[in-house]
Amino acid sequence: MKHTNDSNARYSLQMTAEDVLQAAADILEQRLRRQGSITEPAQAGVYLVARCAHLAHEVFGVIFLDTRHRILSTEHLFFGTIDACEVHPRVVAKRALELNAAATVLFHNHPSGNPEPSQADRLITDRLKQALSLLDIRVLDHLVIGGQQHVSLAARGWV
């Protein structure tokens, strides 16, 4: 939030659109945590739309989960351009191990607004699934966010 200071030493708070969207994402994450666990793609999808649909550049993130699929952390790990984002499996694996995660839900946004997964999206999902499986960490899903919609790769049988 931005704080402004006038000559009378009064402070006023101005929330930016980014602040409002982050607050909404925080509320949705709290709701997911209260539910106890993520049990279906739609639950994570609504939260992730609020978290990253508005971004003007691609981000790739991970929801790290414990053995009961409770959220340990949600993090944007990679930042890209308007149509691409470079993802490194070793970074995802390192962070999963640091958090002692048992499972993950991968996600990224398409700033174009089209949530349809690309061939590159499917390939990175396979690479991450293979790399993390060596560490006994499951990839439960990969959600692609576009506009106010999301597509689950698991729901399509691609995870």
Image: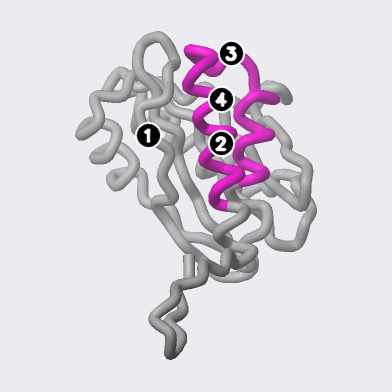
User: As rendered, which of 18 and 56 lies closer to the eye?
Assistant: 18
**Relative height, residue 20 to residue 66 (above, below):** below
Name the spot of residue 131 as percent of width and height, x first.
35, 33
Q: Which amino acid is tagged 2?
A: Ile
Q: Which amino acid is tagged 3?
A: Thr
Q: Which residues are magenta?
A: 22-50
User: As rendered, which of 56 and 1 lies closer to the eye?
Assistant: 1
At 77% across and 52% down in the image, what residue appears? 147
User: What secondary structure do most residues of the magenta stretch adopt?
Assistant: helix
Asked whether, in this view, residue 17 is left or right of residue 36, the answer is right
Compute the Cα span from label 1 to label 3: 16 Å
Specify few, some or many for label 2: CA neighbours under 10 Å numbering under 14, 14-19, or 20 or more: some
Give yes or no for residue 32 being in the magenta stretch: yes
Specify few, some or many for label 3: CA neighbours under 10 Å numbering under 14, 14-19, or 20 or more: few
In the rendered image, which residue does mark 3 sit on? 39
Give yes or no for residue 90 being in the magenta stretch: no
User: As rendered, which of 73 and 122 lies closer to the eye?
Assistant: 73
Residue at the extreme bottom of the image, as rendered: 7
Q: Secondary structure at mark 3?
A: loop
Residue at the extreme left of the image, as rendered: 98
Compute the Cα span from label 4 to label 1: 14 Å
Q: Which mark is residue 73?
A: 1
In the rendered image, which residue does mark 4 sit on? 31
**Relative height, residue 138 to residue 11 (above, below):** above
